[in-house]
Image (spheres, rainbow, N blue to C red):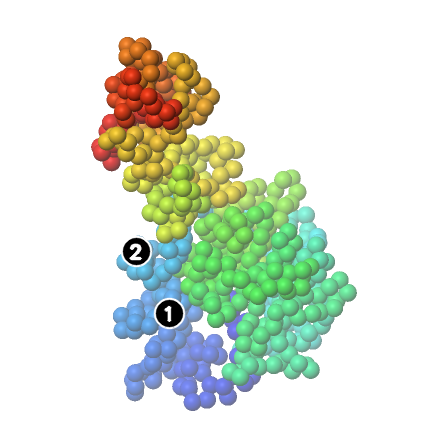
Amino acid sequence: MKLKQYIFFFCLLVSGISLSQKGQSKGDVLFFEYQYQGAIREYLKEMKSQPLSTQQYLNLAESFMKLSNYERAADTYLEIYSKDSVFSVYHLNKMLQAMSFTKGTDSVRTFLNVNQSIFTPELVENANFNFELRLNGDNSSDASAVFNVNDNSPQADFAPSFYRDQLLFTSARSLNTKRKYEPSGESFLDIFVARLNVKGDIVATRPFNGIPDFEFHQGTPYFSEALDAVFYIRSNEENGDLVFDDKGKNSLALGSSDRNGNFRFLLKDLSTSFYYPFYDAESGKLYFAANFEDSLGGTDIYYVYTNNGLIMSSPINLGPRINTPGNEIAPYIFEGSLYFASDVFYGLGGMDTYKSEILEDNIYSIPVNLGKGLNSEEDDFGFIINNYQDNSLIGYFSSNRPGGKGSDDIYGFIIKDKPGIKTFTLNGSVLNITTNDKIPDAEVRLLDEEGNVIKQAVTNSEGIYRIEVPWRENITVQATKGRHSIFSNAYTGEALEQLQTMAFNIGIARVDDLVEETEGQTVLKMNKFYFDKGQSKITEAIAIELEKVVDAVSRFPQMQLRIESHTDSRGGGASNFRLSQSRADAIKEYLETHGVSTSNILYSIGYGEDKLLNDCTDGVFCLETFHKKNERQLIVVLNYDLLF
């Protein structure tokens, strides 16, 4: 059976709709009454006498979509797109959905690549990532584990929620206490409860009496054990009558009912509907779906901070990594993973369930389609999951896939592992190790164990990067930029897991920050150091400075060096020459025993007192300060101009 549209029940333009649509065409009225076949007939008739407006053409295209006439929908959307420069991303998503059904994913990917500037970078990355998974067959789920639950009805049954050892869900099945909802011809929605048997099936379904009786819509429940309360949505009403905004719309408010059945409103706006609450006890956040003015497309997922369920902040959009030009609903968090439904164009069909890892506060990994089995070419949404017996997992979701008992049915599954492929996500900044400044336009690469590049990214203007690939057991992380060093390190096992627990900042060095011009030569920067009088032993203070050379060569292994040692004029010329050579050789030995290759050090030369920097020659009285100026050790970079 076909789903009339999951949001069909929620965008309610009920008894006053005909009045609110006065002055509009018959096609418009039928479209807003969800009578899509009639709307198509009337729009095609009206086209013969006068051109349709852009909005009417969009209504016509969407009517074709609702009736699964994807070829006519795609042709209509493409015709509008070719003529109208003002084409919302919401309708672009619908157009790409229709194209995916009729022209295949290659045509969608081509359109996406040619028109990337229209979409957010996150959407383009999400789409390409999920297309690649489908192409490689990496994201199929176990279809054999999915079963249609026993107590589905011929009406819509959806939005399951765990309730202690039972299951809550929403249904349009008839109740004698409920009037019919005119647009659907079914009963106003209500919340039911069912017992779970040992096989995970639902039995003994009955109306849920843990909330106050209500004559109109109430549904999409979520039970919080931490608060012992049920969050759910219900129609806006006053004194037993529905309340409408100035456009004739009756929206859905969000509230909660405590253990005693006392209801309180939490989010209420006559022009905005709220759906699918989810309370995260660990963070105190209340998640929900809504279509506010800052929506990135259709319905987006938001959260508010709460104090034991009481709203303490304005709604916060989850952002373009999660929300798309399509509709996102039904957030659910389990073991650090956010599950939600979306009808974005790169899915398998209508609504699909996706999984995204929560990396930090409001920072998420690329949402991954759960694949065929848990998803289908129809609408799949309202996914929940929990731990079950024998280290297995049990879950439920709703779908209008073929073979069901009603317009929407609840399906269950029992599986061993969390669904959805595991991904490796790395995010952070690339930093200059000398200045700690963030480096824009640096390249970050992930390599496999054979050294092949898996994926690469470039830091943005603020030096921030984010990169994600399907999980591998061995990954090498590299980062570099022109005239900078290369960071390269391999990770596996626990170290690989640790990389995903926090921002991973990568330090690289700019070669120009490590050198300076001295005596007409390019030398490595070091603080000036002195050997003990007449000695060539490497002291602790000298070693600290030489470690800068070790570090520089490790970052730029192609460096070719000359070690120079100079003395002052005090003492005999021959003995000063021997002393300086001994010191140059001591420096060379230290560097080579601490990781600098012999191929990096071309010369180690002691000049004695041959290259004095002042007039403090033999027989000339000079202050100690001036003699000290002549005693120096230099590490000359011979190929500096050829490094890059």
Q: Percent from the top left, x then y, of residue 108?
A: 32, 58
536 sits left or right of 164 in the view:
left
Q: Residue at x 51, y 37 (%)?
A: 497
Q: Residue at x 49, y 86 (%)?
A: 20
Q: 539 or 302, which is in the foreground?
A: 539
Q: Is residue 237 above or below residue 111?
A: below
Which mark, by number, is residue 113? 2
Q: The disc labelled 1 sits on which kind of residue?
A: Ser
Q: Is residue 158 visible?
A: no
Which mark, by number, is residue 264? none
* Cα–Cα gap, marks 1 and 2: 18 Å
Quadrant (top left, top right, bottom left, bottom right) of the C terminus = top left
Image quarter of residue 79: bottom left
Q: The disc labelled 2 sits on which kind of residue?
A: Asn
- The residue carrying mark 1 is 88
Q: 413 or 115, which is in the foreground?
A: 115
